[in-house]
Image (spheres, rainbow, N blue to C red):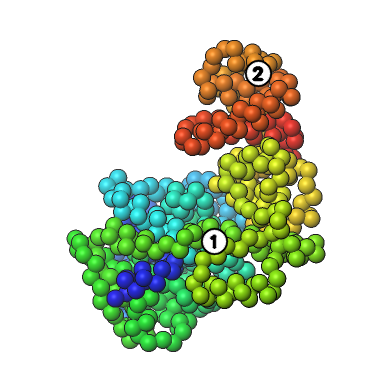
Amino acid sequence: MGLKEIIDNNSYPIIFIGSGMSKRYLKDSESWEELLQLYWERLNSDTSFYSKLHDISKKYSTLPRDELEFQANTEIATIIQKDFDDKFYNNELKVAGLTPKDAYTQKISPFKFDLSNHFSKQKLREDINVEEYNQFKILLSKAKIIVTTNYDQLIETCLQQQTGHMPKVFIGQNGFFDETDNWSELYKIHGSSSAPNSLVITHKDYENYDKRSILISAKILSTMISSPIVFLGYSLTDRNVRKLLSDFSSQLPQEDTRKSANRILVVEYENKRSTLKETIINDRSLDFTYTSIQTDNYTQLFTQLNKIDQGATPLEVRKYSSLIKKLVEDSGKKGELESVLVSAENLDKIDDQISQGRRIVVALGDSKYIYKYPDLLSYIKDYFLNTNNYLPAVALSFAAHDNNKNTKIPFAKYWNNVDLAKLKLPNDDLVKLRDKIACYPTLDSIINSIGEYDQHTFHSIDDIRSKSLTSMKFVSVVTYNLKRLDKKELNNYVLNEALSGFESAIKDKTNLKTAYRKLFVGYDLLINGDFEQ
């Protein structure tokens, strides 16, 4: 049935993530109704939440149950937002991190800002099934695209932990009409706690969302024709889910129902069911056929789905596809495409060989140069050894995407000494690099950040070496004395000892890696100058 077909087809899935997954892994994760009740009771201690909900529901008594609950929830959310925002401006309540001036001038809803604070504080449940959670993270890393209606940061956290990198994130309508790689992308269609005003919760919010939901579905579905689709954490009685599925089904190509069922899985939680119960469902009201899997054994489900393996993760595919595109564009502007593209005749032969199932490797570049993307160690070595294995644009792209804006990596040599206009870096890379620079230390601040027990003055590497310090302390003392040490001696130490020490620290996974990174960042600023803030 569906699960076996999806695994046998070996295509990375599109995964839709609903609130059920947040409730499964996050502590104090509320349902929509529970969240509204929480805020109602903060504002209206004398009026029962359910009394108000009952009064509102009377207006929608002729509607189906799922639509009635949706209309009642959005209306009470609208009331809560108005009351909350009014009380904020009247100084009757405070919102951490927000002033009335900022709220007014930046047009931020205090209610939504407080909601964002609420979701940013969520932590993992203490009783979490670790094996299941680890399999869930692996599954997310194998998703071609992830679509979620959740506000929280669970997905981003899981991917950061699993891959060491963030996915490409699109919030609300932002980015839906941009050209994208369609690999390793996260679409937060109801907004994100990282962007308070993006949250979709009130009646007006949903009106605006519904107007563009078909366009959003069409954008996502343009990448889905050959991919299996898995829904996790949704209840099929929820109006939001049924609207999503309705939009989704309206965009799917016409195909026989069994084919649809074999590529679309809707996973439904069933308490204490240890098996995976599969049923083909033909929902006539949605004009939608899918395979339902009912289970409480998510470890088994995720383990089965994680058998899908195309040899490179979606994140790796995204990196290489964007770099190949950049190589062709940059080389074309220089009139050098002949050095990076095979001839049309050879390209036809390669296409035939792929169709025949032959294993081939295509190198992009001439005999002197292969277009490569670095990892941390190869980047650091190339940076200081000046081997020039990577184009400045590739090196800066790597630096831009090295974890988050607070992660320090040497790149002053490129930023301060290269004509950025000629590199034509993608806007996303420039934004990330400027964010890093805004948080970047100066050489003096790096030196002053060394712990007081390592603040010993020396003017020679040999003098430091004579003190028989531990490796960690040695690196810290060298960093503290960057401005005092002879530059030639310091350069010899960095190239001949520190780089090999850094390589060993990465291999052995020791804390020395962090000490060496601080040394490299400081040495870079010493040689190439501080960034202009």
Q: Which residue is mark 1?
A: 317
Foreground residue among 486 and 355: 355
Q: Position of residue 416 (x, y in %)?
A: 76, 42
Q: From mark 1 to mark 2, how far is it between C-alphas?
A: 44 Å
Q: Please say if 511 is above or below 185.
A: above
Q: Quadrant of residue 466?
A: top right
Q: Position of residue 175 (x, y in %)?
A: 59, 66
Q: Position of residue 258 (x, y in %)?
A: 33, 83
Foreground residue among 304 and 128: 304
* Residue drawn at 31 percent across, 56 percent down: 24
In the rendered image, which quarter contains the N terminus? bottom left
What's the amino acid at mark 1? Val
Q: Quadrant of residue 301?
A: bottom left
**Which label number is shown at residue 68?**
none
Count of numbered labels shown in the rendering: 2
Q: Secondary structure at mark 2?
A: helix
Q: Which residue is mark 2?
A: 461
